[in-house]
């Protein structure tokens, strides 16, 4: 009888571990979605600030770094420029949060 109770306890522990693993995976997915949304909102905010600056002082023009311009062209050709997927083709023209952060950070 004792062996059976140990086996049942081990079986219950195994089920709990699988349940916990599923919860962790769900949390990882949720966190990734939040990070992508946060990056997109930061980029939008930066673009709006740049546009506001342009409207307030149209005579002042900031020169853009040539390296960033080259990366922007590569990104527009549907290739990743981030360190995670560098050189891989972007699927269906989808935006990559890491690439966008690299291109538009201060």
Image (cartoon, helix red, strand yellow):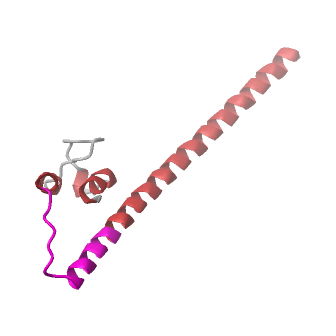
Reply above or below: 7 against 87: above
- Residue at the location (24% across, 50% down)? 91
Percent position (x, y) of residue 75? Answer: 18, 53
In this rendering, position of residue 73 left or right of residue 50: left
In this rendering, position of residue 43 left or right of residue 21: left
- Residue at the location (23% across, 55% down)? 92
Q: Which residues are magenta?
A: 45-65
Percent position (x, y) of residue 104? Answer: 26, 60
In front of the other: 57 or 79: 57
- Residue at the location (28% across, 71% down)? 47
Residue 49 part of the magenta-drawn span: yes
Q: Quadrant of the C terminus?
A: bottom left
Percent position (x, y) of residue 31? Answer: 50, 52
Reply above or below: 50 against 25: below
- Residue at the location (51% across, 53% down)? 30
Residue 27 part of the magenta-drawn span: no
Q: Quadrant of the N terminus?
A: top right
Reply above or below: 80 against 64: above
């Amino acid at each position: 009888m004792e062996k059976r109770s140990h086996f049942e306890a081990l079986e219950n522990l195994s089920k709990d571990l699988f349940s916990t693993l599923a919860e962790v995976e769900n949390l990882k997915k949720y966190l990734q979605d939040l990070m992508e949304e946060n990056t997109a909102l930061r980029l939008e905010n930066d673009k709006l600030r740049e546009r506001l600056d342009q409207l307030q002082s149209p005579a002042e023009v900031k020169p853009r770094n040539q390296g960033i311009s080259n990366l922007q062209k590569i990104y527009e050709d549907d290739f990743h420029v981030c360190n995670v997927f560098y050189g891989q083709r972007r699927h269906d023209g989808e935006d990559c949060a890491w690439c966008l952060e690299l291109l538009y950070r201060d």
